[in-house]
């Protein structure tokens, strides 16, 4: 996965730079989201891994699945990736592009993992606290993991805030062993 992200990063950065220069971040986000969804499809993935299909043919097949929803630049980007044998990295390109876009827009993505389902009020309070801490707008995506026992884990970029009971118990176990 890390290797794939390393390969995807220059593509994402190049598309982001182009989109920013064109003042067209949203359209490129849509383009990459569509392309990532197509690349993630099992049928398409089997074609991407098929050595009997030329890169040109693969690019054309990929574009036919996308239909007329891509503009000329989007189509050229897909053909470039196909030519370089990189269509499989489109989900990572999309993810990295979204990170660049949200950072540019002053928004941070937060992954909130909670031991229990959170009410709207609880989530709003948590987001308000996170926005105060990071001094940026926060968009939170919440998932539930009962193994946390209680509390939450918040992941924002490379930073992890572990306020879970499981995390505290693990820290206590480490402290007792030393």
Image (cartoon, rainbow, N blue to C red):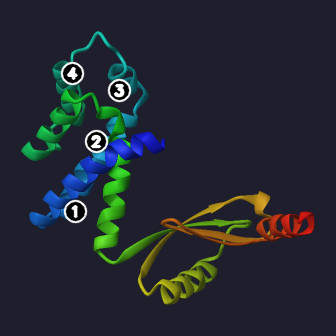
Secondary structure beneath dot 2 equals: helix
Give the tally of numbered discs.
Answer: 4
**9 left or right of 132 in image:** left
CB under 8 Å between discs 3 and 2:
no
| Picture residue at 35% right of the left edge, 55% below the top | 96
**121 left or right of 70 in image:** right
**Looking at the image, is mark 3 or mark 4 earlier in the sequence?**
3
Residue 71 in sight in this render: no
User: Between marks 1 and 2, how big is the CA–CA gap?
Assistant: 14 Å
**Residue underneath mark 2:** 35
**Residue underneath mark 1:** 26
User: Between marks 3 and 2, how big is the CA–CA gap?
Assistant: 11 Å
**Looking at the image, is mark 1 or mark 2 earlier in the sequence?**
1
**Looking at the image, is mark 1 or mark 3 earlier in the sequence?**
1
**Residue underneath mark 3:** 44
Secondary structure beneath dot 3 equals: helix
**Looking at the image, is mark 3 or mark 2 earlier in the sequence?**
2
**Looking at the image, is mark 4 or mark 2 earlier in the sequence?**
2
User: Between marks 1 and 4, how big is the CA–CA gap?
Assistant: 28 Å
Q: Which residue is at the front of the view, 62 or 80?
A: 80
Secondary structure beneath dot 1 equals: helix
User: Between marks 4 and 2, how big is the CA–CA gap?
Assistant: 16 Å
**98 left or right of 127 in image:** left
Residue 114: percent from left, percent from top: 68, 67
Residue 88: percent from left, percent from top: 35, 33
Furthest residue in direction top, as rendered: 52
């Amino acid at each position: 996965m890390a290797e794939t992200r390393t390969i995807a990063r220059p593509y994402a950065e190049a598309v982001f730079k182009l989109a920013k220069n064109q003042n067209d971040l949203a359209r490129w986000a849509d383009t990459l989201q569509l392309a990532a969804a197509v690349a993630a499809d099992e049928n398409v993935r089997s074609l991407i891994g098929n050595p009997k299909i030329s890169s040109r043919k693969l690019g054309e097949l990929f574009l036919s699945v996308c239909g007329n929803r891509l503009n000329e630049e989007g189509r050229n980007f897909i053909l470039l990736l196909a030519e370089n044998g990189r269509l499989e990295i489109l989900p990572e390109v999309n993810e990295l592009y979204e990170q660049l876009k949200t950072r540019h827009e002053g928004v941070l993505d937060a992954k909130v993992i909670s031991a229990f389902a959170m009410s709207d009020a609880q989530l709003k309070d948590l987001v308000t606290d996170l926005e105060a801490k990071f001094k940026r707008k926060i968009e939170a995506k919440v998932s539930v993991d009962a193994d946390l026992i209680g509390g939450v884990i918040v992941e924002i970029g490379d930073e992890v805030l572990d306020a879970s009971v499981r995390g505290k118990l693990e820290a206590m176990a480490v402290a007792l062993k030393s």
